[in-house]
Amino acid sequence: MIRVKSISVRFGIISVVFGFGMFACVKAWAEDWRSYAKTDSYECFYDAQDMIHSSEGNATVWTRLEYTERGVTEMVRKFGKHYEDLSYSLELLEINCAEKKHRLLSITAYSVKGNILYADQAGSRLPPWKIISRGSVEESLYGALCK
């Protein structure tokens, strides 16, 4: 009886782990990263698949910044050697389409090996809105999302 229960528990745990793994694979496959800007430091993409437009006219979207060698060098200069292995960052941004403003809700920076180098979330206190400057990377995203 105990042996059957033990096998049953093991099977349940394996099923849960396998299920989460399948969900992660489906999520990664379902992303639709579209390029919206490029600088000397990074190329910017947004996930068109998971973009949300609220009834207030705001767009919330995940963005991905893939750093160039120059971008990594700049990050190391600003924040230290911890960023020498920087590959990309994922940011959750909210754009106020009516007022042409944006705010950063979450950011996570990843190494080449996929380790988290830095993570920060706005939490319950939302950051203030910032005006989208003409010619900025944010203006390119605004143009893609707020048509």
Image (spheres, rainbow, N blue to C red):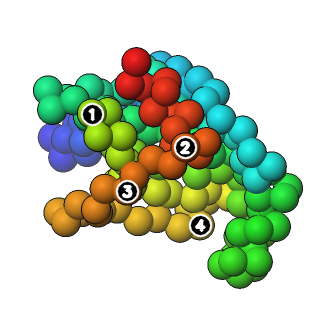
- Residue 138, percent from left and from top: 51, 43
Amino acid at circle 3: Lys
User: Helix or strand or loop: what does disc 3 sit on?
Assistant: strand
Residue 17 sits above or below residue 109 on the image: above
The correct choice, above or below, for 138 with respect to 46 in the image is below
User: Residue 10, located in which quarter of the rendered image?
Assistant: top left
Residue under label 4, please give it.
Answer: 117
Q: Nearer the viewer, mark 2 or mark 3?
A: 2
Residue name at image x 72 percent, y 38 percent: 38
Alpha carbons under labels 2 and 3: distance apart? 13 Å
The kind of secondary structure element at disc 4 is strand
Q: Position of residue 13 (x, y in %)?
A: 31, 41
Q: Residue at x 84, y 58 (%)?
A: 70
**Residue to which mark 3 is pinned:** 130
Q: CA distance from mark 1 to mark 2?
A: 15 Å
Mark 4 vs 3, N-terminal side: 4
* Mark 4 neighbour density, 10 Å: few (under 14) some (14–19) many (20 or more): some
Q: Is residue 11 visible?
A: no
Distance between mark 4 and mark 1 Cα atoms: 34 Å
Q: Is residue 125 left or right of residue 140?
A: left
Marks 2 and 4 sit apart, C-alpha to C-alpha, by 31 Å
| Callout 3 touching callout 1 (CB < 8 Å) | no
Residue 98, disc: 1
Of circles 4 and 1, which is in front? Answer: 1
**Tags 4 and 1 touching, CB below 8 Å:** no
Q: Residues within 10 Å of mark 2 (few under 14, many from 20)?
A: few
Which amino acid type corresponds to the residue marked 4 in the rendered image? Leu
Disc 1 residue crowd, few under 14, some 14–19, many 20+, Cα 10 Å: few
